[in-house]
Image (cartoon, rainbow, N blue to C red):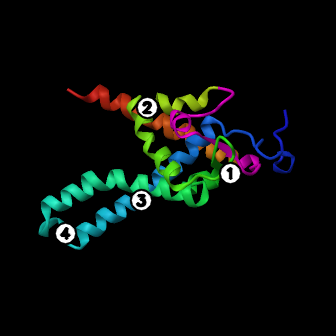
Amino acid sequence: MRREEPDDWEEGEAPLAGFWVRAGAMLIDAFLVYLFFMWVTVSVRTLGLVERFPRLTFFVVLQLLPSVIPLAYHGLCLWRWGRTAGKLAAGIKVVTEDDEELGPLRALGRTACYALDVLTLGLGFLAAAWPGQHRALHDYLAGTKVVYTEDLPLWRTLLIVSVGILGITALFLGLIIGVGTTP
């Protein structure tokens, strides 16, 4: 079955992005956020802030930034462009249920709802794997959906899906190994 070309898509009828493409995009974003966090951490150490302000540095770097950086990155990107760098690579975009751009509050709210996906041990994310709606828990709560914006070449689709599959496999193996080695 041939996937429709973007020119064939009528207004509001862009196909919904599938689970593995979304997973690949999210893992690309997670890697970028991780790189930024590591840059901040190295900068704090290089500037000697850990020695000068140990309690403040501990609170900011280890407790505040891991929450604020992803929230700011996803919220700002979704509000301004409707997509993050990972979603851009995957050729997908977040829109409202009515195919409108996201406002700042909806973008931030959708991003904050990722916490509920995590609290359900990933089941909230897994909801996007069900055929038909392809919407995760945070999409339902925020009134959004993720759609294709372009028809990707096969090699790019395979690359994004491979990132998703390998990343989630590594996550589960890490959990299994981590749980198996705890006393």
Comparing labels 4 and 2, the label whose residue is closer to the camera: 4
Q: Give the mark nearer the N terminus: 1 vs 4.
A: 4
> Where is mark 2, residue-wise?
172
> Where is mark 1, residue-wise?
91
5 left or right, relative to 183: right
- Tag 1–tag 4 contact (CB < 8 Å): no
Measured in 3D between alpha carbons, the distance from the residue under mark 4 to the one under mark 3, in whole angstroms, is 20 Å
Amino acid of disc 3: Leu
Measured in 3D between alpha carbons, the distance from the residue under mark 1 to the one under mark 4, in whole angstroms, is 40 Å
Amino acid of disc 4: Leu
Measured in 3D between alpha carbons, the distance from the residue under mark 3 to the one under mark 1, in whole angstroms, is 22 Å
Measured in 3D between alpha carbons, the distance from the residue under mark 4 to the one under mark 2, in whole angstroms, is 35 Å
Residue 41 in percent (x, y) is at 29, 62
> Where is mark 3, residue-wise?
35
Q: Residues within 10 Å of mark 2 (few under 14, many from 20)?
A: few
Residue pictured at 50% horizontal, 44% vertical:
110
Q: Give the mark nearer the N terminus: 4 vs 2.
A: 4
Residue pictured at 60% horizontal, 29% vertical:
129
- Asked if residue 142 is among those painted magenta in the image, a careful observer would answer yes
